[in-house]
Image: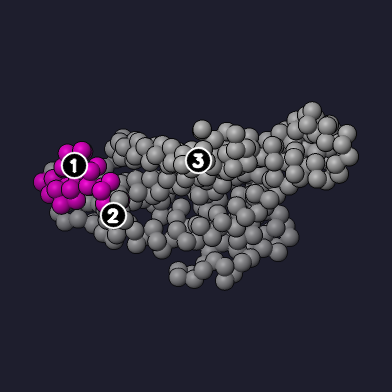
Amino acid sequence: MNGLSRYVAIRLLGAIGVVWAASVAIFAAMRLLPGDAVDMILAKGAGSGTGSAADKAALRAELGLDRPLVDRYLDWITGVLRGDLGHSLFSGRPVTEIVGARLPNTLVLAGIAAALLVPLAIGLGAWAGARAGRVRDRVVSMASVTMGSLPEFVTATLLIALLAYTWPVLPAASMVRPGVSPLSTPDILVLPVITLVAVMAPQTIRMVRAQMAEAMASDYVRMARLHGIPERRIVLRHALRNALAPAMPLLAGSITWLVGGIVVVETVFAYPGISQDLVHAIGHRDLPYVQSVTLLFATITVVGYVLADVAVVALVPKLAIR
């Protein structure tokens, strides 16, 4: 087994441990949420009776909420390993079915945003850093600082005000009919995608720019210039390669945020992603749904960082464990 393969194996084992620890933390945190799902179900008439202590005890037993926490955790995590995320406390539908109906829409939005984020952030950062201190560097740096200082809901609100009301060229809401892919009406994706990219790109641009500027001022770049190597080749084959390695973890964090932190953007634009169901489930203490979706987001985040670490080692092989 070579250094890269050994490194990947170790990182995968570590990732499994992190996901397991996250599952324990998520399960415990769900029990600290204020309120009681049983009270909410009875108040909404989802259960029988008038909400007496006997009714609550009966419903709690029916839902399995009276069992020891360890047993409930083991049942949940073994179900997750089998692909069974449990059943919603309110609708009774399988959580897998509920998530499956909305998750593709969220992945479409996140995928398009990521496809634009990666080349845009790397390209602008490298373009500015290759000529540090010049006009283009100052313009890119100022724009990235300005955009990065705005929360996503502020950016989304400004875009709606400008492009949906002042100049009504795009819809303010990103609603689609159930069962219809958002790709069938691509105009509803424009504002959410712009918001996500505008929020996440600045920090990656600044990181790539800083690393690129440092690489361009290094001894090996000066030596390459003395040997007459074309500037374009120096930038693309030497400086950029070394500049990307430190920026990879940050870029991975940005991409994983697109899945886990997309809740605000989907809510602002009324986009039919997983966020609407998640917000509703949190408000109604639908623990099986909330903890399963949270674990899904945590797993995606861990996988993203593992892929970033592998990409760093692929760019700089000497970092692999020997």
- Which residue is identified by label 1? 71
Say which residue appears at 41% left-offset and 55% top-offset: 277
162 or 179: which is nearer to us?
A: 179
For label 3, the SS is: loop
Residue 137, picture quadrant: top right
Say which residue appears at 50% left-offset and 49% top-offset: 259
Tell which tag, 1 or 2, sits nearer the viewer. 2
Q: Gap between marks 1 and 3, in whole Å? A: 42 Å
For label 1, the SS is: helix
> Left of 128 or right of it: where is 250?
left
What range of the chain is rendered magenta? 54-80
Dot 1: within a 10 Å radius of its alpha carbon, few (fewer than 14), some, or many (20 or more) residues?
few
Q: Earlier in the sequence, mark 3 or mark 2?
A: 3
Measuring from the top left, give residue 267's x and y in whole percent.
Answer: 51, 52
Residue type indicated by callout 3:
Asn
Measuring from the top left, give residue 191's x and y in whole percent.
Answer: 64, 57
- Which residue is identified by label 3? 2
- Which residue is identified by label 2? 82
